[in-house]
Amino acid sequence: MFTALYQGLRLEVNDLDEKTKIMLVSDAETAQRAILDMINSYPDFPPGFKPSNSTILWNSIKDTQSIGVFPAQDPVYLKKYVSGSYVGQMTFQIVYKSNPTTNKDNIAASNLLENIAKFLESGEFTLKDKNFVAEQINRTSDVFCGTADGKTTELAINMQLKYFYKK
């Protein structure tokens, strides 16, 4: 069902069926790039960790110290506009892989993920894509241990992003 505002300035689709809600890959990639931008702009990475495209990865993680961002479910449209603009939602997981040798190192790794999540929730980041507006970012879990093999540990936190994209 469409809801029309005066002169079609903001026609919106409110009642999206389940098939229509699943986001196109091209639109999902916009959110992926924005999430990576947000994390890369975090100002307090530990000494020796240089945020870049080789240390903060989408849907991947290195064998060494790195951050992987993984989609937790299919991104969806919450609202679509005739202009092509939309409100979307993406649930994702941030994983930090490190090699802690002490309990203090383990706590520091956990705090890093917690602080990145707080930073994302604060909205104090700058995005390269000026058409992307993060409306709300929330943690949907506490930091938890994904895997630990005696050499490396992967800690994770789940997040949800609601955003508007203007086309």
Image (spheres, rainbow, N blue to C red):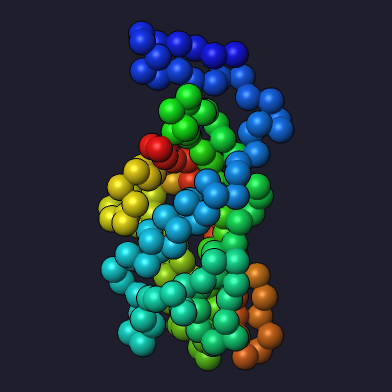
Please indicate, yes or no, whether residue 106 appears anywhere in the rendered image. Answer: no
Q: Is residue 134 left or right of residue 75?
A: left
Q: Is residue 164 left or right of residue 143?
A: left
Q: Is residue 90 left or right of residue 52?
A: right
Q: Nearer the viewer, residue 120 or 53?
A: 53
Residue 46 lies, in percent from the top left, at 36, 79
Tell me which residue sits at (55%, 78%) in the image.
Answer: 97
Residue 107 lies, in percent from the top left, at 47, 75
Please indicate, yes or no, whether residue 81 appears anywhere in the rendered image. Answer: yes
Q: Is residue 94 above or below residue 80?
A: below
Quarter where residue 78 is shown: top right
Q: Single out the residue that lies furthest toward the right.
A: 19
Q: Quadrant of the N terminus?
A: top right
Q: Nearer the viewer, residue 13 or 122?
A: 13
Tell me which residue sits at (48%, 46%) in the image.
Answer: 161
Tell me which residue sits at (71%, 33%) in the image.
Answer: 19
Q: Nearer the viewer, residue 95 or 70?
A: 70
Q: Is residue 19 above or below residue 133?
A: above
Q: Is residue 72 above or below residue 39?
A: above
Tell me which residue sits at (51%, 28%) in the image.
Answer: 80
Q: Quadrant of the C terminus?
A: top left
Residue 3 lies, in percent from the top left, at 49, 12
